[in-house]
Image (cartoon, helix red, strand yellow):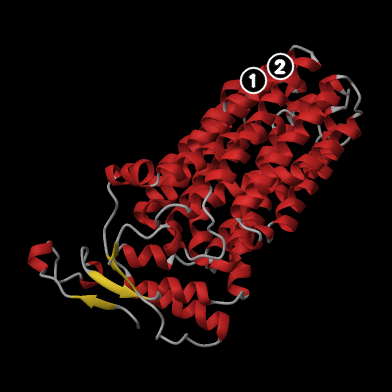
Amino acid sequence: MDVQRTPRSSAANGVHASRPERDFDRVIETSIPFRLDRLRWSGFHTRIVLALGITWILDGLEVTLAGALAGALKESPTLRFTNFDVGLSNSAYLAGAVLGALGFGWLTDRIGRRKLFFVTLALYLTATAATAASWSVASYALFRFLTGAGIGGEYTAINSTIQELVPARYRGWTDLAINGSFWLGAAIGASSAILLLDPALFGPDHGWRLAYLSGAGLGLFVLVMRMWIPESPRWLMIHGYPEQAHAIVDNIEKSATGHVQDPALPKIRIMMRHHTPLREVAHTLFTVYRRRALVGLVLMIAQAFFYNAIFFTFALVLTDFFGIAANQVGWYILPFAAGNFLGPLLLGRLFDTLGRRAMIALTYGVSGVLLAMSGYLFSIGALSAQGQTIAWMVIFFFASPAASAAYLTVSESFPLEVRALAIALFYAIGTGVGGVAGPALFGALIDTGSRHSVFAGYLFGSALMVVAAAVAWRYAVAAERKSLESVAPPLAFVE
């Protein structure tokens, strides 16, 4: 084992001799980051992608159901939603995701990534099953809020884990591919909506309830897959568990190469700590890394408004402006989901080769310009429902990797001790500013019945994306193929 401790006075540091593994404020030398980054791609990493990517499938399922079921909720004899109610309940989901990300993000950095996997998933399972039993607009909005809280907590733990377990040369593509799997969930949600909203099979107040129950069923499958994912060795070595950290890395190396790697690798020296005080977190994010924080905020706000405003009201545009029946909306979501999934999959490797700055600026800029162009065609009535769907499919081929790159940028730009909370904070601010208001705003614009009013909303979203592209090109960090510790040294790092 390549852990070397630098002796210190136990009395001086308040360390109890009976708990040697948790001797906080002790300096150790470790090669864990180099061992993890040196690994080639293996079955272990593939299993990580599958086990973590399925969470975004859940989120995609939830968001798509919310959009595809909008018509059914309006036709429900129990709920009788208006367009405003649809937008409000979607905003409640996003508000829950914001608060869940903040609360669980703080806990993720404090008690570890793995523990939060199960807490947040349990909340999601309970809340989404309860949504199926909603009896009023208020109860539906409450359960959507709690479902969002579970998903928001998942974002922080999982994005942190991706960064800390995947070798540096694969990190960009892996992060984008996992986040892009959201759209597999969207396809499942759309397919479920087509079947469950068929009036020949289910009554108007039963199909949408069964759709939410299908999400809870998928969540149980995720619970089983989570059992074997290890805690982040990087988190363990800083928080007083170096022996456990090295045991996990040993097992990963044996799985990937058949043996433990040569211990004669570079080492870093760190001082173990119990937790990072919030004052130090704030100083790190907004003083030490002020420019990176600005980039993260701009990227998050732009993509949150762009995505949530458009996608949450996707069904309303089709039903109100193109006359598409509510039970047929799923057919239009399927090609839209395909474009969103293929974007990160096909463009993701360029983030590791051409680089972060170039690809973030490109994807944000192109998607913003294309939205403005298609919005104009929509405003003059030049697009059919099929033409509008094709336009959105092309736009979000670029917007999907752009949105995923926002999470990638935030999760690799800050030190390990504050990584999960940074993801949570920037996601919360971005979603709070751009996402929560977006669906309600677009719901109100659609209610006017004016294509020009909706076009104004599209132009605003387009402008946000173009501004974000310029900011990324000027200030984003070139983190491609670099170790996390070289991009942002741990706060516990000792010279």
- Residue shown at 84% from the left, 32% from the top: 327
Quadrant of the rendering where the N terminus is positioned: bottom left
294 or 75, nearer to the observer: 294
Q: Quadrant for residue 487, please give it.
A: bottom left
Which amino acid type is marked by label 1?
Leu
Residue 40 is left or right of residue 36, and the answer is right
Marks 2,1: beta carbons within 8 A: yes
- Residue shown at 38% from the left, 44% from the top: 285
| Looking at the image, residue 89 lies above or below residue 215 | above
- Residue shown at 69% from the left, 46% from the top: 362
The residue tagged 2 is: 445
Residue 301 is marked as: none
Residue 201 position within the rendered picture, expressed as x and y whole percent measured from the top left: 86, 37
The residue tagged 1 is: 441
Residue 113 is left or right of residue 17, and the answer is right
Crowding around mark 1 (Cα neighbors within 10 Å: few <14, some 14 to 19, many 20+) is: many
Which residue reaches farthest front? 474
Which residue reaches farthest left? 11
Spatial separation of the CA atoms under disc 2 and disc 1:
6 Å
Q: Quadrant for residue 73, please give it.
A: top right
